[in-house]
Image (cartoon, helix red, strand yellow):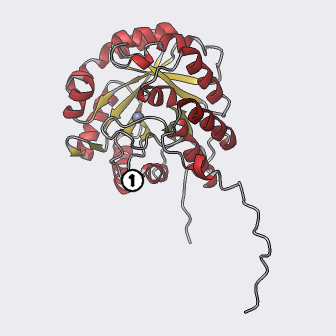
Amino acid sequence: MSKMILPSKVTICEVAPRDGFQAEKEWIPTEEKIKIVRSLANTGVQSMEITSFVHPKAIPQLRDAAEVVQGVQDLTNIKFRALVPNVKGAERAIDAGITKLKLMLSATDSHSLSNANRLVEDAQNGFAPIIELAEKSNVTVGGSISVAFGCPYEGKVSVERLSSIVDRYNQMGVSEVSLADTTGMANPKQVYDYLGELTEAFPNIAFSMHLHNTRGMALANAVAALQRGVTLFDSSIAGLGGCPYAPGASGNIATEDLVHAFEEMGVDTGMDVDRLIDVAKEMKEYLGHDGGSHLLQAGPCSALSPKPKGQEKVEA
Ligand code: ZN
């Protein structure tokens, strides 16, 4: 009888400081942001998406990007990356001390226009100077594709479409590409099938998964990706990170849920579930809500309940 074959070890990137915070309407003071990043840094996490260097007017919540990055420069055991929409953002990020940039585009023109006011091809044409700047500055670059599996305006994205976008990244020398299920439209079979084609066509590309739990499929999608050998995952503490198209919907897959599930399956994340739950609780208390965390509700499997008293079999 054959057993499920999974990678023995994965790397999880905590994205709450970017994806989670940008969804919050109430201003989070810079010192509080730094404090949260520091709490997260104690969970064993090795990689964090700390902010986005977008125009301050586009996302006012992240207008203190540089100060936040500068405030955690001593945390040298964590690889901090930042999202950059253009060269200006890349310059600001590098000046602030960021050593990994993440490029962003959408899989469809409709989403690209509504999200970034540009066509997908225009976004791609804007990458060359960012990559050039990164190379000059000795900074690494990863790519990302929003609405990679489904677009709220155009529906299912074909694997051919996805493949052509990955190909363009590949030609530009980008060797890590994040597939983002931004609005939670992917399903596990689609993830498994698409990754089968993509990993075969692009053996030199490391794919990472950014899964929102909008429709409750994120963990199943993560396992489908794991079965295809993917070892890079994004997640957000307490499930923070909204969906602009469905207010009130679940956000990203919660870091504590993902780490717990992987560890239960024997996949090493290097992270500590109990500490994650503590930070998730702090976040929920501070913000007044979570983004849909199962462990905050139920606790980990390891927290056993006392057996009910008088459990002897009762004679009929
Ligand atoms: Zn996201």
Residue at position x 39%, y 41% from top? 248
**x, y percent for residue 182:** 35, 38
**x, y percent for residue 166:** 31, 35
Beta carbon at label 1 within 8 Å of ligand 1 = no
Disc 1 marks a residue whose amino acid type is Tyr
Question: Which quadrant is the N terminus positioned in?
Answer: bottom right
Question: Relative to residue 265, is residue 130 drawn left or right?
Answer: left
The front one of 238 and 194 is: 238
Question: Relative to residue 226, is residue 129 drawn left or right?
Answer: left
Question: Is residue 235 depicted above or below 309 in this figure?
Answer: above
Q: Which picture quadrant has residue 123?
A: top left
Q: Residue furthest front?
A: 288
Q: Is residue 138 visible?
A: no
Residue at position x 28%, y 40% from top? 163
Q: Is residue 110 visible?
A: yes
Question: Which quadrant is the C terminus positioned in?
Answer: bottom right
Residue at position x 75%, y 69% from top? 308
**According to the image, label 1 marks what residue?**
192
Question: Is residue 205 depicted above or below 133 in this figure?
Answer: below
Query: How many residues crowd mark 1 within 10 Å: few (<14), some (14–19), many (20+)?
Result: some
